[in-house]
Every structure is written in C-alpha cells, then in structure tokens.
C-alpha cells in the first residue's frame, strides 16, 4: 500500500495548466503508510492488530475491507465480511432512524427485505425503539453509534473487522457489544480486532500483528505481541 | 437471520459483497434505497411536494409559449405541446447529468469510508430523475387532452426514446463525474455549457427556422435526434424516421460505453482525490 502525497491535493484545471506551461514537474513525494505486510488469518480465529497512532492500522483495515485499493499486492477474503469501521458513515441525519437502517444496511450489502424483517430487533438492540421514526438529527451521538453498531453486526458475517468500536456508548451498552462479539466468536466467526487495550488483546485474541512504521511487522501469539508492544511504547 | 452468502475471492478492487452470488440483488436494493432517498430529499419541506414535478414543466411551458408563440407559433401548430415534450426530454437529460456528475464528489465521505460500488451514485441520480420524469408525464397528458391532440400507436416508441435519453445521460454523468473528481472545475464548465446546449437544441423552436448552415452544425448535437425519438411519436403521431432511430441508438450506446470506460479506468483512484 502506497500513498502518493501529491495526490492528496485537489488542484484546479487552471493551476494544472499553468504548471504544465511553466514546465514544472509535479512533485511526487511518496510515503507508504503500510508496506510489505503479509499475513494469513485462519477461519474462526480472533486476530489482533496493534500499533501506535499512525502505524497504519486503519489503512490496513480499509484495504482489507475493500474501501481503498492496495497499490501493490492483493487481499484474499473467503466469506462474508462485515466491517465495523467508520460506524455510521452512511447515515443521513435528515432521515429517520428507520430510513437510516435501510440506507446504512443496504450500503453494507444487506437486503431490503432482511432489514425490514429485522428492524425491530435492530432498534431494540440499539435501545432506540421509541425514536425509530424520528429524524437522526435529533438523536444523541451515543444513540447514533449504537444504531450503527446494531445494523453492522446484524449482518451475520463470517468475518468481522472491528476498529476500536467497543468504546461505543455507555458501560451497559459496551457490555452488550462485547457479549455480541463473544457470541460471534463462539459461533466461529473470524474477527480482526484493532485495539490499544492490551488486556482485551490478551483476553480475546489468539494471535496478533504489531505494526510499526519504523520496523518490520511482527506476528506472534497475543501474549508475545502484547509484551513487545508494551516494550516499544515504553509502557 | 438470512444465511450469509459465502463469497470467496481474491480482490484488489471490488470487495466480495458486491461480487459473486447474490451481489446483483444487493446492488439493486442499494440502488432502490438511494433513488428513494434522492426523491425524498428533493421535496422535503415543500408544501406541494411531488406536485412540483408536474407544475414545473407546465410553468416553463407557459412562459416559453408567452414569449415565443408570436415568433414560432405560426410555424408550429400546437406550440405549447411541442414545447412541453421537448422540455421534459431536456429536463431528464440536464438534471440527470448535472446531478449525476456532482454525485461522485458529493458522496466523497461515503466513498472514503464504505466499500460501495461508486457507479451507484451517478446511477441513482439518473434513476431518481427518471422517476421524476415519469411523474412529469402527467402534465403532458393534461396538455394533450387540453389541446385535443390524440395519441397513436407510434407512442410505443416513447419508452425506447426515454431509454436512449437515460443511457446517454448516464454516459455523460459517468464521464464528467469522473473528470470532476480530478478537476472540480468540470462541474462549473458543464453547468455553464448546458445553457448553450439548451439553446443549441430545438426544444422551443422548430429546426426549420434555422439556416442551412446552422442545421448542418446541429447534426452534431447528439441531443437533437434523441429528443426527436421522444417527441415525434407524441407530437406528430408517427414513428421517428429509421435514420433518426439508428443515429439515436448508436449515440446513446456509444456515450454510455464511453462513460463507463472512463469511469472504470479511474474509479479506484477516486478515494485519493475526494
């Protein structure tokens, strides 16, 4: 995965033409948020991904989820993948909760019929049943996050990508989320978990991957990776 | 719970949800949702709501008739009918293409955060305008009844004309929408250019008023034949000429393919520029 820094800037036709006429070359400063990362996760495994901020964890997950195409290399996925990334990114605050279940659900690839059948269960899990026909702009941020989590985990996936979303909502809701994840794991769902919590890592993951921009990646048992990560961060 | 669809795959572009078995159904469900949302958004907080879709062409028709019937009325019988048919076709194209063009950039936050097929946004924009177009056939019927113009079997050509205009519109939206991701000026250029395009298309004037030279130039305006395929069966009650049908078909399909090729060539890079 390579990022082209120059690409990040939107330039106008005018600017482009002027630069071309002046014979300026476009500076292509490049950086690779993640590079040479190869690993295989077994079915049913809970696999942890740790690393400091900016180590490329989210980028890696986005590549796996198919949001960002890799510059080089490829991703091989077997089974239905449900990314709990950027929860609620597809929400439209002008629409009601019910309409947003439909919108966000279909964006994730769920069927309309399935969502209509599941709407009550989703609203119930998110604890927003009385407000399901109220526009989302009147929801609290906690309610929005809960609704997003409820939809995304309703997909009955084979693979779940979890990016720090367990910090959604208050303590009782967090417990519910953890229970739901535990049920998924018990059912044999493969989980990719990004976390900063070494306790969670050691408790839930079998193996883990340590991302570090200045060093090659390390893959090992969760306990081993937790130790290395703690050592590197001076913790 | 519905059972998960098992999709296996190696990919660097399209994630498995949008490929493989069952993907088509998911695709249409998302399209359906986005089209519904676009229509809802358009009429939110307006008292007349959907009635605007029907009133709008009528109002424009009245204005154009008042302004131009002196000039063109003598040449064109049932001038208001002539105008409204052309207007409906034009609105489908101009609204569909401008909204489709803008839709990719406007959906930027989604494209950066959700693994969604990006062609969905221009498709939904054109789709929403097709639905609106169908609603605006109601005022057209009013005008037909009011002016006591009957319809003939030639009207069976109308759906085909609409299909061609839709394809052409989609092609323009995909091509310009792709360019707009890299150069945001495209949208403004196009919106300005549309005005010229409107005057350069025989919507409110008959082609006969143009000089020989102007008509020769007009041959290069793809919208002219596309509008004709839609207008002739209703206005004149006869099938469009074979030449018109062939030209319109070729143009619409060529534009759709061109737009799709341009889009496919660059769509994986959108995420870096949006």
Image (cartoon, rainbow, N blue to C red):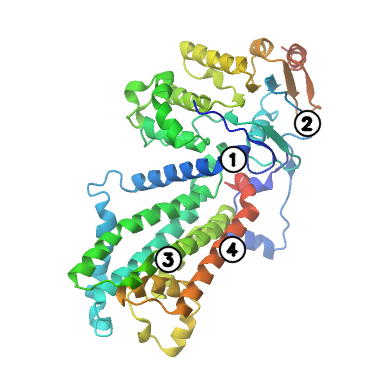
* Drawn side of residue B250 relative to residue A235, left or right: left
| SS class, disc 1 | loop
Residue farthest to the front, as pictured: B153
Q: Marks 1 and 2, Cα distance to the nearest angstrom? A: 28 Å
Q: Marks 2 and 3, Cα distance to the nearest angstrom? A: 52 Å
Quadrant of the image containing the N terminus of chain A: top right
**CB of mark 1 within 8 Å of CB of mark 2?**
no
* Drawn side of residue B130 relative to residue A67, left or right: left
Looking at the image, can residue A101 be seen? Answer: no
Residue drawn at (50%, 28%), measured in percent from left and top?
B2
Q: Marks 1 and 3, Cα distance to the nearest angstrom? A: 31 Å
Label 4: chain?
B
Disc nearer the start of the sequence (4/3): 3
Q: Which residue is mark 1?
A: B21
Residue drawn at (44%, 62%), measured in percent from left and top?
B163
Q: Residue B127, how many percent across, how many down?
A: 43, 53
For residue A38, the mark is 2
Q: Marks 4 and 3, Cα distance to the nearest angstrom? A: 20 Å
Q: Out of B141 and B104, give the one closest to the viewer.
A: B141
Disc nearer the start of the sequence (4/1): 1
Q: Which residue is mark 4?
A: B258
């Amino acid at each position: 995965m390579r990022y082209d820094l120059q690409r990040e800037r939107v330039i106008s036709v005018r600017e482009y033409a002027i630069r071309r006429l002046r014979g300026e070359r476009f500076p292509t400063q490049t950086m690779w948020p993640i590079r040479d990362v190869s690993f295989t996760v077994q079915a049913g495994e809970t696999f942890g991904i740790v690393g400091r901020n900016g180590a490329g964890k989210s980028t890696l997950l986005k590549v796996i989820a198919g949001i960002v195409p890799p510059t080089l290399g490829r991703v091989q996925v077997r089974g239905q993948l449900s990314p709990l990334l950027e929860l609620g990114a597809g929400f439209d605050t002008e629409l009601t909760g019910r309409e947003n279940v439909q919108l966000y659900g279909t964006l994730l690839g769920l069927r309309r019929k399935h969502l209509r059948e599941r709407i009550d269960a989703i609203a119930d899990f998110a604890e927003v049943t009385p407000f399901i026909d109220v526009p989302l702009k009147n929801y609290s941020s906690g309610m929005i996050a809960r609704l997003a989590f409820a939809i995304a985990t309703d997909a009955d996936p084979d693979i779940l990508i979890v990016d720090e979303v367990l910090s959604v909502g208050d303590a009782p809701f967090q417990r519910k989320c953890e229970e739901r994840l535990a049920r998924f794991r018990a059912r044999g769902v493969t989980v990719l978990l990004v976390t900063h919590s070494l306790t969670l890592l050691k408790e839930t993951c079998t193996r883990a991957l340590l991302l570090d921009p200045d060093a090659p990646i390390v893959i090992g048992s969760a306990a081993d990776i937790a130790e290395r990560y703690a050592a590197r961060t001076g913790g | 719970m519905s059972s998960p669809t098992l999709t296996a795959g190696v990919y660097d572009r399209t994630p498995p949800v949008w490929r493989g078995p069952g993907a088509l159904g998911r695709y249409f469900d998302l399209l359906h949702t986005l089209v519904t949302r676009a229509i809802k958004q358009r009429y939110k907080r307006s008292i007349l709501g959907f009635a605007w879709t029907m009133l709008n062409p009528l109002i424009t028709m009245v204005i154009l008739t008042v302004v131009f019937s002196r000039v063109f009325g003598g040449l064109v019988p049932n001038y208001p009918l002539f105008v409204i048919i052309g207007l409906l076709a034009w609105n489908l194209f101009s609204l569909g293409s401008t909204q489709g063009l803008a839709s990719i950039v406007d959906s930027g936050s989604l494209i950066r955060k959700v693994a969604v097929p990006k062609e969905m946004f221009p498709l939904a924009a054109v789709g929403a305008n097709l639905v609106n177009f169908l609603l605006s056939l109601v005022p057209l019927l009013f005008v037909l009844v009011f002016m006591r113009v009957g319809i003939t079997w030639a009207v069976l050509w109308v759906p085909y004309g609409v299909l061609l205009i839709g394809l052409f519109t989609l092609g323009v939206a995909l091509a310009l929408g792709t360019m707009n991701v890299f150069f945001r000026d495209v949208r403004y250029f196009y919106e300005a250019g549309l005005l010229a395009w409107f005057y350069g298309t025989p919507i409110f004037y008959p082609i006969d008023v143009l000089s020989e030279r102007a008509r020769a130039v007009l041959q290069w305006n793809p919208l002219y034949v596309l509008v004709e395929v839609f207008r002739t069966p209703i206005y004149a009650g006869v099938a469009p000429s074979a030449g018109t049908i062939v030209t319109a078909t070729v143009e619409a399909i060529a534009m759709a393919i061109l737009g799709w090729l341009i889009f496919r060539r660059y769509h994986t890079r959108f995420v870096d520029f949006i």
